[in-house]
Amino acid sequence: MVFVSRQAKIDLDNIVIGLLEWEKVELTVLEVMLYVDDISDICYKLDNLSYHHPAKYKEHLKYGEYSHSYKRNSNTTWYIIYDIDLYNHIYVNKIISNYLTIS
């Protein structure tokens, strides 16, 4: 089972706002909602993964032990940072882009 934290939900809301206000490319509301729905869908499928990648970036380790990357396009990768409890429940703690990740 997957649980999404309040912070991760705020992150998704901020992605919506950021994409709607993005001056480089104009996206419709429908395009933005589909974009964010894709990220959300990935969150809810994390419990089906056979392997969970340990978080490796210092910024990610602040939010969880594991990180799943979703490469949206050639420029943008989203990192879903999460933890797993003893019952294999997934707790999504943070969603962050490669633009905010310092290697």
Image (cartoon, rainbow, N blue to C red):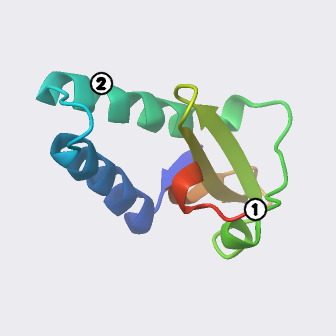
**How far is mark 2 from mark 1, CA to CA?**
29 Å
Disc marking residue 94:
none
Return the x and y of residue 5 as percentages of the image width and height.
Answer: 45, 63
Q: Position of residue 97 (x, y in %)?
A: 53, 51
- Crowd band around label 1 with a 10 angstrom C-alpha radius: few (<14), some (14–19), many (20+): few
Relative to 18, 75 lies left or right: right
Q: Residue furthest left?
A: 29
Q: Is residue 44 above or below residue 90?
A: above
Q: Which residue is mark 2?
A: 34
The answer to whether one can see residue 97 in this image is no
- Tell which of 20 and 65 is nearer to you: 20
Residue at 67% x, 51% y is 89
Asked whether the viewer can see residue 90, the reply is yes
Judged from the image, the secondary structure of the residue bearing numbered disc 1 is loop
Q: In the displayed image of the protein, which residue is found farthest to the bottom? A: 62
Residue 73 vs 58, above or below: the answer is above
- Closer to us: 73 or 6: 73
Q: Quadrant of residue 36?
A: top left
Question: On residue 103, which mark appears?
Answer: 1
Give amino acid for label 1. Answer: Ser
- Residue 32 is left or right of residue 97, and the answer is left
Q: Going 79% across and 58% down the picture, which residue do you hit?
A: 55
Residue located 83% across and 60% down the image: 56
**Dots 2, 1 in contact, CB < 8 A:** no
Q: Residue at x 84, y 54 (%)?
A: 54
